[in-house]
Image: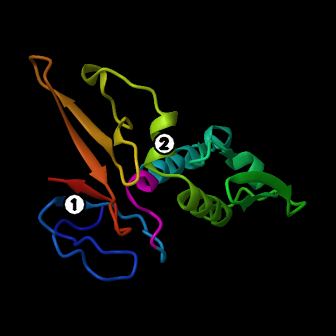
Amino acid sequence: MKKLGSRVYFYNGFPKPNQTVNASVLDIDVGKKDLQQCADAVMRLRAEYLFAQNQFDKIHFNFTNGFRVDFVKWAQGNRIKVQGNNTSWYKAFEKEDYSYLNFKAYMEQIFQYAGTLSLSKELKKIPIDSIEIGDVFIQGGSPGHAVIVVDVAVNGKGEKVFMIAQSYMPAQNIHLLV
């Protein structure tokens, strides 16, 4: 987390005009392009976690057209060709690259062609009483919206409260909501 009281900034460096919805800001870059919006932030946090755990084979997302994009295939030197609604892999590099820099390039590709619509089709519905950290509230569409559960607490009566984080449009810092 950034220092308490930190402001939310857009990808272009300008501060978000309405700072009243954010309780705190995650210390994770937003990038220099208008790409890391709401669903992208959800995908980024999941992928960052899996990358940090070296669980590369679990990092995969679908483009809006349904094309599955696995990080392992990307790291093996393959790249994606998109022509209209047709998507395919091609071999671009012989050397494997599991570096963080290559991971970030992979995520940028995901941000360009995936969003709330594709993510909503990938996720499984769960009952609200079984909510856990990492679960997502999503309304798929263009535009849609997605937020991710980042903490859960249960009191002595078994009642749950949870904390959620989001990004938004235009792309901005991921932040905890008030």
In the displayed structure, 63 sits above or below 13; it is above
Where residue 49 appears, as percent x and y from the top left, is 50, 46
The residue lying toward the viewer, choosing from 28 and 120, is 120
Q: Is residue 62 left or right of residue 125?
A: right
In the displayed structure, 156 sits above or below 49; it is above
The residue lying toward the viewer, choosing from 34 and 154, is 34
Q: Amino acid at mark 2?
A: Leu
Q: Amino acid at mark 1?
A: Ser
- The residue positioned 73% from the left and 52% from the top of the image is 87
In the displayed structure, 49 sits above or below 133; it is below
Where residue 46 appears, as percent x and y from the top left, is 48, 45
Q: Is residue 76 visible?
A: no
Badge 2: how crowded within 10 Å, few (<14), some, or many (20+)?
Answer: many
Mark 1, residue position: 24
**Nearer mark to the viewer, of 1 and 2:** 2
In the rendered structure, find residue 86 and report the number of the disc placed on it.
none
Q: Is residue 121 left or right of residue 67?
A: left
Contact check, label 1 and label 2, Cβ < 8 Å: no
Label 1 and label 2: CA atoms lie apart by: 25 Å
Mark 2, residue position: 119
- The stretch in magenta equals 34-41
